[in-house]
Amino acid sequence: MPIGFTRKRHFYFGIAVWSAFMVSSSALNAQVIGPCIQFLDQNGAPTHEGLKCDFSADSVTVKFFGGGSIRFSVNGVITGNAQPNPPRVHEFTATFTNGTITGFTWKNAGKPQGSPDIPPGATDFHFISESGLNPVTFSTNGERGGTARPPLTTVQIELFLAKQP
């Protein structure tokens, strides 16, 4: 009798360990992915503001001065040419889903003014302004969230989608 009881106990213990492993593995694969931004100066060097992330955000709005251009990449590998903003446009909104950029809209006074071509699977972009950037606003489900304020020397921004640490 004791042998049968011990075998059952080991069997159930094995199932419990296996189940715990499966649950923890799926939990690790379901990490939250969100946008992180880095402000850069005219030479492309990071400013003192450091990296700003909002892992709950599903979009980011950037206002800028002068003209500008956007360049998309997939996991840091640039794809395609730089795409300039339309005339009289000084704002854009980028949206994200499951680790990829799903939308990008140039805006004027909050009204859509067109979209650049987003390469399939784009995970990040580099934006250069001719004259500087205003605060960057993170949003979740259309609700404004946190704001990241760039230093006055900022004319470039890099955005990438990263897993929450």
Image: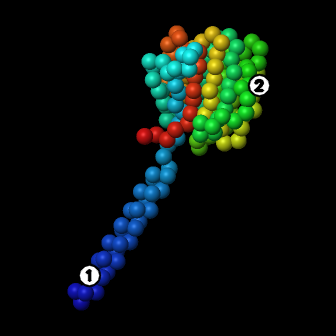
Residue at x-position 48% and y-position 30%? 53
Q: Residue furthest bottom?
A: 1
Q: Which quarter of the figure is the N terminus placed in?
A: bottom left
Judge left or right: residue 26 versus residue 102.
left
Secondary structure under badge 1?
Answer: helix
Q: Nearer the viewer, residue 118 or 7?
A: 118
Residue at x-position 46% and y-position 40%? 164
Q: Are marks 2 and 1 in contact (CB under 8 Å)?
A: no
Q: Amino acid at mark 2?
A: Gly
Q: Nearer the viewer, residue 52 or 3?
A: 52
Residue 84 drawn at (x, y percent):
74, 21
Residue at x-position 66% and y-position 42%? 121
Counting residues from the start of the chain, the first of labels 2 and 1 encountered is 1
Q: Nearer the viewer, residue 37 or 109?
A: 37
Say which quarter of the image contains residue 126: top right
Question: How many neighbours does mark 1 have within 10 angstroms: few (below 14), some (14-19), or many (20 or more)?
Answer: few
Residue 76 drawn at (x, y percent):
59, 36
Judge left or right: residue 57 versus residue 101.
left
Residue 109 appears in the figure? no
Secondary structure under badge 2?
Answer: loop
Q: Nearer the viewer, residue 67 or 76?
A: 76
Cα distance in 3D space between marks 2 and 1? 69 Å
User: Can you identify the residue that label 1 sits on?
Assistant: 6
Task: Give above or below for 90 relative to 101.
Answer: above
Residue 4 drawn at (x, y percent):
28, 86
User: Can you identify the residue that label 2 sits on?
Assistant: 114
Q: Which quarter of the figure is the C terminus placed in?
A: top left
Residue at x-position 59% and y-position 40%? 75
